[in-house]
């Protein structure tokens, strides 16, 4: 399973003011950041790939799509990139709306570079946490799909009954021998690439394994 790191993260800077965009990109690059600059929301949308980790430093007031409209567009398209607004025009209502919609912060121009860098660090961290959690979920669901019907039955029972996971108890409930449960348990841990049933129970909620199991059973019945 791949794990994203800060080294892969990019600042996507969107501002229609050439002077501000160029000077800010230069300053951030000098600080060691990777920066991609865009003069409009539309040009950013044409170039951005959801697989690229990072954050969006976004001017609020721009011709065409403004900052809030781009934020709404990204949310509708389920493109969850952390956004830091920078603005010389937006007031309290705009900043409140941006924050309600999930922005990391709303900085009014002129602002200190140190303020922006602190926001970028926060945004990078949030983005990496989200991406690594998504990778973990995808891998767990992929591994779960490798289980046989009987292994899934045993796994689901233990997920649903976390206080009843001994082989003897599971065997009694599922009407199979404890030795057979031991065999299934070992295969479940191996296929799921985990070290314990407790770990299986922990990841089952975030990866929605039970919902996945219901969907798979529904398909098999049709």
Image: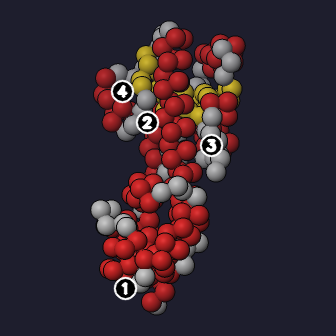
Q: Nearer the viewer, mark 2 or mark 3?
A: 3
Q: In this view, does 13 lie to the left or right of 216?
A: right
Q: Can residue 155 be seen in this view?
A: yes
Q: Residue 3 carries which label?
A: 3
Going from N to C along the chain, the mark reached first, 1 or 4, is 4
Q: Distance between the residues labelled 3 and 4?
A: 33 Å
Q: Do the residues labelled 1 and 2 touch (CB within 8 Å)?
A: no
Q: Is residue 164 left or right of residue 6?
A: left
Helix, strand or loop status at disc 1? loop
Q: How far apart are marks 3 and 1 (CA)?
A: 41 Å
Going from N to C along the chain, the mark reached first, 2 or 4, is 2
Helix, strand or loop status at disc 4? helix
Q: Do the residues labelled 2 and 3 touch (CB within 8 Å)?
A: no
Residue farthest toward the bottom in the current orientation of the protein: 222
Q: Is residue 95 above or below residue 27?
A: below
Helix, strand or loop status at disc 2? helix
Depth check: 173 or 67 in front? 173
| Rendered location of residue 7, percent (x, y) | 67, 30
| Rendered location of residue 161, percent (x, y) | 31, 67
Q: In this view, does 178 lie to the left or right of 131?
A: left
Going from N to C along the chain, the mark reached first, 1 or 2, is 2
Q: Name the residue under label 2.
A: 68
Q: Nearer the viewer, mark 3 or mark 4?
A: 3
**Dot 4 surroundings within 10 Å: few (below 14), some, or many (20 or more)?**
many
Q: Distance between the residues labelled 2 and 3?
A: 31 Å
Q: Name the residue under label 4.
A: 95
Depth check: 26 or 6 in front? 6
Helix, strand or loop status at disc 3? loop
């Amino acid at each position: 399973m791949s794990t994203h790191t800060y080294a892969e993260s990019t600042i996507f800077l969107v501002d229609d003011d050439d002077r501000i965009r160029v000077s800010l990109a230069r300053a951030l690059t000098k600080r060691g950041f990777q920066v991609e600059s865009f003069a409009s929301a539309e040009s950013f949308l044409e170039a951005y790939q959801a697989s690229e980790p990072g954050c969006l430093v976004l001017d609020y007031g721009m011709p065409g799509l403004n900052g809030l409209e781009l934020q709404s567009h990204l949310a509708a398209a389920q493109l969850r990139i952390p956004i830091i607004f920078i603005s010389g025009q937006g007031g309290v209502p705009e900043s409140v709306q941006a924050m309600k919609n999930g922005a990391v912060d709303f900085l009014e121009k002129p602002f200190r570079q140190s303020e922006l860098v602190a926001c970028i660090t926060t945004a990078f961290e949030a983005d990496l946490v989200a991406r690594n959690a998504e990778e973990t979920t995808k891998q767990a669901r992929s591994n779960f799909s490798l289980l046989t019907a009987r292994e899934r039955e045993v796994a689901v029972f233990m997920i649903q009954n976390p206080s009843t996971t001994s082989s003897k108890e599971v065997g009694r409930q599922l009407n199979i021998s404890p030795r057979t449960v031991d065999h299934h348990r070992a295969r479940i841990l191996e296929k799921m690439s985990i070290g314990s049933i407790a770990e299986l129970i922990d990841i089952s909620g975030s990866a929605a394994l039970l919902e996945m199991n219901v969907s798979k059973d529904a398909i098999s019945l049709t």
